[in-house]
Image: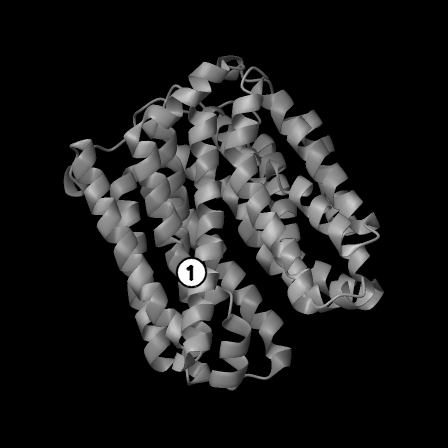
Amino acid sequence: MKTPNAGRALLALSLGGFGIGTTEFATMGILPRIASGLGTTIPRSGHVIAAYALGVVVGAPLVAIVTARMSRRALLRVLMVAFTLGNTASALAPTIETLIAARFIADLPHGAYFGVGSVVGAELLGPGRKGRAVALIMAGLTVANIVGVPAATFLGQQVGWRSTFLLVGAIGLVTLVAHWLWVPHVATLGGSSIRQELSALKEPQVWWTSLVGAVGFGGLFAVYSYIAPTLTLVSGLPESALPWVLALFGVGMTVGAMLGGRLTDHSVSLATWVGFGATTLVMGLFALTARSPWAAVPLVFLIGIAAQFLAPAVQVRLMEASPGAPSLAASMSHSALNIANAAGAWLGGLVIAAGYGYLAPAWAAVALTLLGAALFAVANRASGCPAQAQAKHASSPA
C-alpha cells in the first residue's frame, strides 16, 4: 500500500540525487578553472574526478555495512550532512591535494544514498513499484544534467570554481531540510545487523549483476567522456552548441529512466534486454552517422534514453538478489556504475590514442554492451532462471 505523502518524500529523495548529479558532472566543466586557480595542470586536476569515482566505489558498500544498525531515515540524513560538509570543504580547499581529499570524502555518501534511498522509496510506493521508485530517485541525477550542471558550470566560469561547490553545498542543505520535513519513518526499514548486510555478498547474483552493470554501462561512458571533441571535431558543431546538446542528453536520460522504471516493474529481465538492445543499436548508428550534426544530435538524445533503461533494472535486480540486505545490494549498483565510468573512459581514450579517431569509442561501446548482454545471459543461466521466462515481480512486496 502506498504511503500517504509518498510524493513529497520521493521529491526530497530525488533532490539529493539532483545535488549528487550536479557535483559529479559539473566538476568536469570547471576543471581548467580549478587547475589555474590552484596553480596546477589540467591532468593533475583531473585527479579530482578520479577521487570522486574512487569515493563512490569504496563508499557505497562500506557505508552500507558500517551503518547497518541505523534506521534508514536517520542514515539518509547523515549521508546528506556528509555530502554538504564535503562540498563546502571542497570550496575552501587551499591546495590541489586538499581538494582531492575533500572530493573523496564528499562522494563517499553517493552510492549509499542512492542505494538506501531506493529501498526507502520502494517501501513508500508499495508492492510492485520498485522500478518506478528507483527511477524517480535517479531522475534527480538525470535532471541535474539538464539544469544543475549547466547552471553550476556557468556560475563557476563567471564567479570562480569555488562557487560551484558552494552551490552544491547549498543544494545539500535544502535537501537535508526536505528530508527532515517530508521523509517519514518507515517501521519495516529499521537498522539491520552488520552480519545481515554482509549476507548480500554471499549471493552469487549480487556479484553477477554488479559485473553486468560494470561492463554493460561502460559503453555509455566510453562515448560520453569524449562527446565534446566528437561533436565539435567530427560532427562540426560549434562549441557554443555543446551545452544545449548535453542538456538534450540529460532530457533523454530522464525519459529513459521513467520508461525503464515502468518496464522494470513489468519485467526486470525484459527491461535489461531492451536496454542492451537499444544501446547497441544507437551506438552503432552513432559510429556510422555522427559525422553529420543532423544525425549526431538526435542520436545523443537516444543514447541517453537507451542507457537509462538499464539503470532501474540493474538496481532492482540487485535489491531482489539479496532481500535480507537490500541496502548494501542496491548500493553496489553505484559502485558498479563508477567502475564502468572509469573503465569506459579508459577504453575510449585507448582507442582514440591508438589513432582510430573520435568515433572509435562508439564501436568500443558496442563491444562493451554486447559483452554486458552476454554476461547477463550467463547470470540468468547461473540463477536457473532463463531471461525469457523470468517471473514478473509486480506483485512482490517492496
Q: Is residue 82 above or below residue 183?
A: below
Q: Amino acid at mark 1?
A: Leu
> In this orientation, does residue 398 appear?
no
Query: Looking at the rendering, which quadrant does residue 315 occupy?
Result: top left
Identify the coloring: one colour
> Which residue bears the numbered disc 1?
220
Q: Is residue 378 left or right of residue 276?
A: left
166 to the left or right of 369: right
Nearest the eye: 208 or 275: 208
Residue located 71% across and 45% down the image: 101
The residue positioned 59% from the left and 35% from the top of the image is 13
Q: Is residue 388 left or right of residue 316?
A: left
Left or right of 257 in this view: 271: left
Q: Position of residue 18 (x, y in %)?
A: 62, 47
Quarter of the image that includes the C terminus: top left
Is residue 303 among the parts visible in the rendering? yes
Task: Give the SS element for disc 1.
Answer: helix
Report x, y in % for residue 318. Answer: 37, 34
